[in-house]
Amino acid sequence: MKSTRAWFLILGVFFIVLVGLTGFAAIMAESPPAGIFYMTIAMAVVSFSMAYLYPQFIQKDERMKLIRQKGTMASFVAMVIYFIFFTTALQFNWIDAPAYYLFQVFGALMISTVFISFVIYARLY
């Protein structure tokens, strides 16, 4: 069990190193980061979250079902808010970015929000 948590931590550190390298390359090139940058951040969040949640997620008890249910509902509400924000920002030209980058950011936010809400509800219950 502990070895699985260690692998999640190792993967999280690996993804953070990749984020650092691609961010550094983007800064040195004086350009926005590549689209994969945002998904790599999301994968780091998933890895660190699963390292924390793994011992609890292998249990199939009522507490974990409640955490999954509440976390999914909170993530859905957050995703609707993200969607409204991005739509409004694009409508009023507050954001001047290609749709590809916005989809990458939106996808990374969705993935990260689900796992962060699981961690928050696991801490609460």
Image (spheres, rainbow, N blue to C red):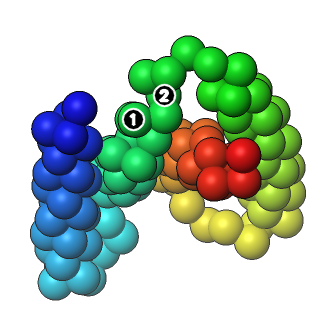
Vertical side of 103 occupied by 41: above or below? below
| Residue nearest the viewer, comparing 36 with 111 | 111
Q: In which quarter of the image is residue 73?
A: top right
Q: Give the amino acid at mark 2.
A: Phe
70 lies above or below 62: below
Which residue in the protein does label 2 denote? 57
Say if mark 2 contacts mark 1, CB within 8 Å.
yes
Q: Mark 1 points at which residue?
A: 54
Crowd band around label 1 with a 10 angstrom C-alpha radius: few (<14), some (14–19), many (20+): some
Quadrant holding the N terminus: top left
Label 1 is placed on what type of residue? Tyr
**Front position in the image: 112 or 59:** 59
Q: Which residue is drawn at 78% across and 35% down?
A: 70
| Residue 90 seen from this side | yes
Q: Which of 105 and 19 is in front in this view?
A: 19
Along the horizontal axis of the image, is 93 left or right of 9?
right
Q: Residue furthest top?
A: 60
The count of marks equals: 2
In the drawing, does residue 8 fall left or right of residue 74? left
Please tell me how crowded label 2 is: few (under 14), some (14-19), or many (20+) other residues with Cα within 10 Å. Answer: some
Residue occupying image coordinates x 22% and y 52%: 9
* Whole-percent x, y for residue 80 in the image: 83, 41
